[in-house]
């Protein structure tokens, strides 16, 4: 039985290998991935400008091959900007509240310090 299982597995592997060979190679993805790898290697080898340029070209090629994904992100971009703007406004209001509380606490502490100095003298 184990010999049959092994043979059946090998036949499945051959069929899978043949189906993978019949698929056309997507050269845009290959070039984009290669450009990203080369850009990373250039960046790590302290050739930062060349690395950034090659990585940017690879990213552009990757975006070209994923056109629908980029379009979906572009449609969602205004929503994301609104969400970030809302978070920033919330953070600003909280910082204003903290500043107001800090000022009132400083006033209280100064008045306590003045009262303490008056009682000591």
Image (tube, grey):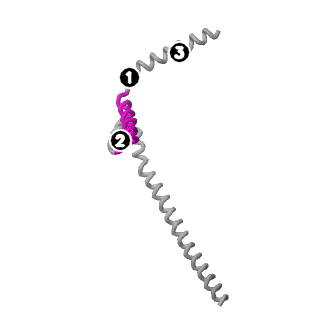
Task: Give the class, few, some or many, for how many residues have Cα within 10 Å of label 2's Cα (few <14, many ≥20).
Answer: many
User: Which of the marked residues, 3 or 2, is nearer the chain's N terminus?
Assistant: 3
Q: Kindly state the secondary structure of the residue where label 3 is placed.
A: helix
Q: Kindly state the secondary structure of the residue where label 1 is placed.
A: loop
Q: 45 or 115, which is in the foreground?
A: 45
Residue interval drawn in magenta: 26-48
Nearer to us of marks 1 and 2 is 2
User: Farthest residue in the front direction?
Assistant: 45
Residue at (55% x, 69% y) in the render: 98
User: Which of the marked residues, 1 or 3, is nearer the chain's N terminus?
Assistant: 3
Figure check: 6 above or below 36: above
The circle on residue 24 is 1
Nearer to us of marks 3 and 2 is 2
Q: Position of residue 47 (x, y in %)?
A: 35, 42
Q: 40 or 76, which is in the foreground?
A: 40
Task: State yes or no: discs 1 and 2 in contact (Cβ < 8 Å).
Answer: no
Locate the N terminus by quadrant: top right
The residue pinned by badge 3 equals: 12
Figure check: 119 above or below 74: below
Q: 71 or 61, which is in the foreground?
A: 61
Asked whether residue 67 is in view, the answer is no
Asked whether residue 35 is drawn in magenta, I would say: yes
Majority secondary structure in the magenta region: helix
Task: State yes or no: discs 3 and 2 in contact (Cβ < 8 Å).
Answer: no
Locate the C terminus by quadrant: bottom right
Task: State yes or no: discs 1 and 3 in contact (Cβ < 8 Å).
Answer: no
The circle on residue 51 is 2
The circle on residue 104 is none
Residue at (49% x, 14% y) in the render: 14
Q: CA distance from mark 1 to mark 3?
A: 21 Å
């Amino acid at each position: 039985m184990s010999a049959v299982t092994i043979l059946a597995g090998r036949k499945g592997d051959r069929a899978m290998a043949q189906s993978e060979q019949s698929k056309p190679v997507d050269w845009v993805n290959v070039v984009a991935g290669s450009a990203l790898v080369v850009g990373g290697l250039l960046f790590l080898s302290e050739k930062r400008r060349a690395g950034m340029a090659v990585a940017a070209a690879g990213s552009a090629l990757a975006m070209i091959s994923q056109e629908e994904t980029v379009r979906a992100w572009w449609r969602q971009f205004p929503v994301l900007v609104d969400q970030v703007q809302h978070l920033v406004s919330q953070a600003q209001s909280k910082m204003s509240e903290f500043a107001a509380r800090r000022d009132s606490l400083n006033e209280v502490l100064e008045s306590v310090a003045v009262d303490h100095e008056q009682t000591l003298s």
